[in-house]
Amino acid sequence: MEIRIVIDDRIVSAVRRSRRPLAWMLGAFAFGGGALALAAPVEDLVTFEAGDIISAADMNANFAALRDAWNDHVIRQDMTISIANADGCGALVQALADLSEQVIRQEATVTIELAPGSYTCADTIYLQHPQGGHIQIVGEARATVVLNFPADTVGFANSHGHSVGRLASMTLTGATGGAGVNARGPRFQVEDLLIQGFDFGVQAEQGGVLIGTGLELTGNTEGARVATGSYMTLTDTIAAENVRGFVIQTGASASLGDCDAIDNEGSGFSTGGEAVIINSEAAGNQIGFEAGARGAISGSNLTATGNYHGFFAVYGGLISVNSPTANGQEGYGFLAEDFGYLDLAQATAMGNLYGFVANTGGKIRTAGTETLGGNTTADYSPAPVSVNTAASGIYD
């Protein structure tokens, strides 16, 4: 960085009238009076009293102190901070606090590496660096690095205006309450995490954006939750043995690809918002794919296996998918009721109690040829017709 200052009699007079160090005065002029936060105070090398002669050497010394302090404040190249297991979770918190006093240039990435072992964390770890998109926190592997959090505590959280570059390769364990990862900022990226024991495994809320891949969300109240006004993208993610798997609230949106909901007590995929889901499966849940009031699911290649109901649109919810498959549900493969709407192309219904059911204002519209077989009570209820003539029904 090059600083050019033209010194005239007004500046010299100001310095002579002040008892502040010259470096402080020149810093104020050089940076236009703006606040410049440095990691440590600039040392007083040369000070001046009224009437002193200011020499070039003295000025250079003070400028050098200011320059060195600024350089120490800026990270210009990639760096790695290693956290030993013996130093505990507190060392991670301290490393983040130290980084808060640094500026990370665009070309640099700071990686905090956690050594294998179990870490007991007393409170939420907040990620709020202004250049947080250039910080990544990684473990050796999620099987070897475990962070434990107390009850009613969020694990990792960012806030409005703060991104997180990457949180990866570890296990986060809660004791009920809170969320494993809570995104409120513009981007929180997570990879290769096992998250268990929280109210929400991963959550985006208050306008937050969470992007994740390779997650396993198990034993939480909800595996993944997207709150009103927020957005989440997940790929290659499993939500298993939660109360509900993937939940998108009214006014929220999500994009899910290659995601599986397995053995959740309620719905595998549930939306009151907008969800695009592709190449995903729901197995062993109460409901595989559910669109409720104001909810919409669109996508392709979705499979429901061994749930009570496979695809369920209710209270005006919409499910519009290509190539959906419902195999082996205890109840209905495809169900539209209470003005729910299923818009299906090339659907398969096999081995369910009923294949396609529309009642109490629900509608099912099918395109292409359905694949049917082994539905023990009926393939269709009521029988499909070619023209939409009733408040509810199944229409080819």
Image (cartoon, rainbow, N blue to C red):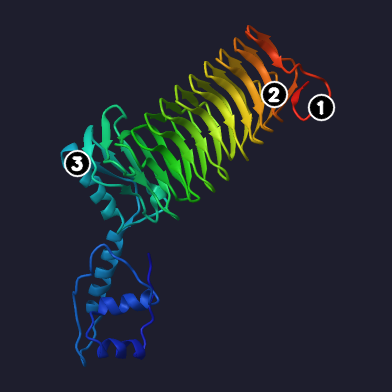
Q: Which mark is residue 63?
A: none
- Give the alpha-carbon distance from disc 2 to disc 3, as whole Å: 57 Å
Residue bearing the label numbered 2: 358
Q: Is residue 237 above or below residue 368?
A: below
Tell me the kind of residue under disc 2.
Ala
Residue bearing the label numbered 3: 88
396 relative to 93 in the view: left or right: right
Residue at x-position 40% and y-position 46%: 164
Mark 2 / mark 3, whichever is N-terminal: 3
Residues at badges 1 and 3 in contact (C-beta under 8 Å)? Answer: no
Residue at x-position 23% and y-position 45%: 122
Q: Is residue 225 above or below residue 267?
A: below
Circle 3 sits in a helix, a strand or a loop, which is it?
A: helix
Q: Is residue 222 above or below residue 132?
A: above
Residue bearing the label numbered 1: 388
Circle 1 sits in a helix, a strand or a loop, which is it?
A: loop
Tell me the kind of residue under disc 3.
Gly
Residues at badges 2 and 1 in contact (C-beta under 8 Å)? Answer: no
Mark 1 / mark 3, whichever is N-terminal: 3
- Quadrant of the image occupied by residue 33: bottom left
Q: How dense is the environment of label 3, judged by Cα within 10 Å: few (below 14), some, or many (20 and up)?
A: some
